[in-house]
Amino acid sequence: MNLARRPRLRTGLAGLVVLVVIGAILQAQVGHPTPALAATTQVDSGVVGWDGDRDAAIVHRDGSFDIRAGKNITVGFGIYNNPTKLQWTNAGGFYPALTTQFERDNTTVTITSFGDRVVLGGNAYVAVYSRVAVFNHDTISRTANPAASAQLLALNSTSTTVQPGQTVNHDYVIAVDKFGASYAWPSNSALVAAGGYDAHYQHMTTYWDSKLAGITQLSVPDPRLVNAFKAGYIYTQIVKDGNNLNVGENGYDQLFDHDLIGILVGLMEEGDLSTAQAYLQTLFSSQYPDATYKHSWPWAVYLQKTGDTAYVAANFATIQTRAHQIAADATGPGGTMMTSNAIDANGHWTVDDQSALLGLLAYKYIAQRLGNGTEAAWAASQYDTLFAAVNNQLQSTINANGLTYLPCAVDVPNTANRCADTNDANWASTMLFGRWNWDGLLFGAAQTGPMSTLLDATYSYGFAHLSGLPAHTYGGYPGYSTAYNAGYGEAGLASSGHRSEGVYGYQFMINNTQSAPYSWWEGIPTAGASNWSPGAHATSGTGSSPHIWGQANASKVLLNSLIAEKSNGQVIVGRGLPNEWLRNGQTMSATNYPISNGNRMGATITTSGTSVTLTLTGAAPTGGVAFDVPYFAGKIGSASAGTVDNANGVITLGPGIRNVTVTLTSTPPFTLLGGLDLTSYCTSIGNIGGASLDGSTANDWKCITNSGTHVGMSMDDACAWGYLTNEGAFSQLGSLGDPYSWKCYAS
């Protein structure tokens, strides 16, 4: 991470963290590429590899990939000819098999590469398998030579001549990693004999399907968010080294103390608890003070989800030491926290005070669960003292300067520090990295004082002070956006007016700033059009791509927008649902969600007109459920069960209630964005024949593939493509009998 532009050092190929720009990308030429040293810093960078590998391969949209682990080469395919348009996706929507598709000489070329673990001679390796598939949609034969780098080993022998209507596959393999071991690389013959592309692809998908089955299963009206959630989890496993939850591969390839805390909490909340003890043992606090202050938080989440008091008790001494450091560090103005460089400049940053408050809440929870009344009382007293000090200092600064927002430092207005920089996202640092608003609420924090009362005003202030940027981005460091863009919406879950900001921020990232399929640089100075379609993408980046802390925050805010558990055992459902998801006929769910003491539950929400139904499955949460949807406030006509708080839009369900239907007094209003360009949309996703109306109804629109096949299309996706900066855009039909009545809407 960083909370901002941290000048982290990384030894090896990447050297210093640098700014990468699109113009620096080297394009492969026709013919065999010249072997080159791995250029890991080009902007279009994703990863393929295996769970816990040391040096994942870094893949680029031209189909080339960088191999480190002592080889330090880039391999690729000369058939790539820098087309004017290409598609770059995850195979299957989310698998770590990156696929590039483009047109060349009336053929469609698809390059797919993925990693698989192979054991040869008793030694474990990661091998990358690549397939260059050439489909000839011409009426005459075509010659298409993949022109693979010499280091790639051919797994089959096929002709470079492709007959009309036929596909020829060229398969390759190369060893890319040894899991940090020092044994020799496998022989070429052993690697080729280890099996073909299809068998290893099946093994890869089976493995990741099994891993994903252990975490929360999400379903939402925008399936891209679900794919991003799955891909983010898989990338986390690939980027980590053994059990070290590193932040990146082409930068930040190490542990960072407060990044680690956020990544680990995210994994546990998703339900990845089988390795949690090993991850907890990697926690450290030597880089940033807020990591010391929040050290108790992942331990509290682990205790809450597992009920494993014995393991936490065995590690309580360290937890206690870190928690007591909070009192020692409360040397700032008015008894607030000491100076730090939390956002890459020295100051009395509000984020540190919030981190300390969350740490004390988590520590109190642990002490109570372990029956340590003395430490629980100490934590409660320290929390009250610090909370009063922070509120008093903030209010003094607000009053003295006539502020209408929560300043990023407790003692000066934003105009007096780096938060004054144009399009610097650090104005929102407290919205994510302090964690007090939302995660503090989950651990019982009363939402009072300026950190709560000015929450909505701070979002409004920050967005209004950006220059030349669209809605739902917070700026960069400085610049266009960041990998934390969705995460900055987390505090909005504790607000009144910005509860869906995390979801909108995630959709903004998908629409506008990917640097590889479902991957983002930490800092994104610029973004815009390229030959990668659909959507806009990062055109420069800093840090690493993918950036795992950023992706962990995006996954957490998406998950918590659907479902979140409080420390008292109550589960909140629907807290961040966008209004668009309440339109007629929608279904969203979170199942296999971990709740207290090793249990799992599910929640499914369906909409039909003014009726919204919640159905619970699995274990019953001990504290019941709060069905708490933003649009419900003031619009609940009736509920079939539970206690209704219409003013706040909450239906409270006891532990025994499994189903409730809420009847609203109205449905959400939406704004017309405009119509659809279906031909351009179809070609943007690789269907080169454009769009066709194959009947007389609105459901008869089809895309035409390269083979001439007519296939269905998603009108919602077409709206997202057509209105990239209108997050939440969806399609709505005027009349089934009028094929031209499709329109796009958003809140």
Image: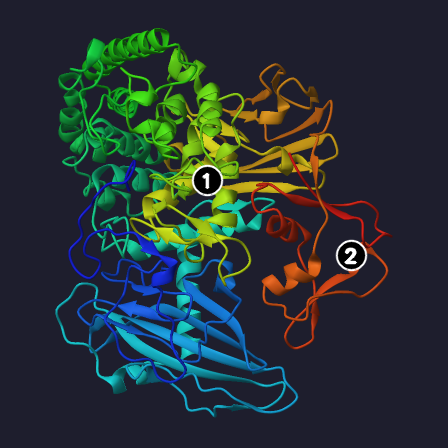
**Residue 279 bears which disc, if any?**
none
Q: Earlier in the sequence, mark 2 or mark 1?
A: 1
Q: Is residue 60 visible?
A: yes
Marks 2/1 in contact by CB < 8 Å: the verdict is no
The residue singled out by tag 1 in the image is: 593
Q: Quadrant of residue 691?
A: bottom right
Q: Amino acid at mark 2?
A: Asn
Q: Is residue 434 visible?
A: no
Secondary element at image label 2: helix
Horizontal side, residue 323 vs residue 626: left or right = left
Horizontal side, residue 154 vs residue 463: left or right = left
Q: Position of residue 87 (x, y in %)?
A: 52, 65
Secondary element at image label 1: strand
**Where is 715 relative to 460, above or below?**
below
Horizontal side, residue 724 vs residue 694: left or right = left
* Crowding at mark 1 (Cα within 10 Å: few <14, some 14-19, many 20+): many
Q: Quadrant of residue 68?
A: bottom left
Q: Position of residue 314 (x, y in %)?
A: 16, 33
Q: Position of residue 460 (x, y in %)?
A: 49, 24
**Where is 347 relative to 388, above or below?**
below
**Where is 718 relative to 103, above or below?**
above
Q: Residue placed at 63% from the left, 23% from the top?
A: 632
Nearest-to-viewer mark from 2 and 1 = 2
Q: Residue placed at 44% from the left, 27% from the top?
A: 462
Q: Amino acid at mark 1?
A: Tyr
The residue singled out by tag 2 in the image is: 699
- In depth, the one of 465 and 203 nearer the eye is 465
Q: Quadrant of the C terminus?
A: top right
Q: Position of residue 368 (x, y in %)?
A: 27, 19
Q: CA distance from mark 2 to mark 1?
A: 36 Å
> How many numbered discs?
2
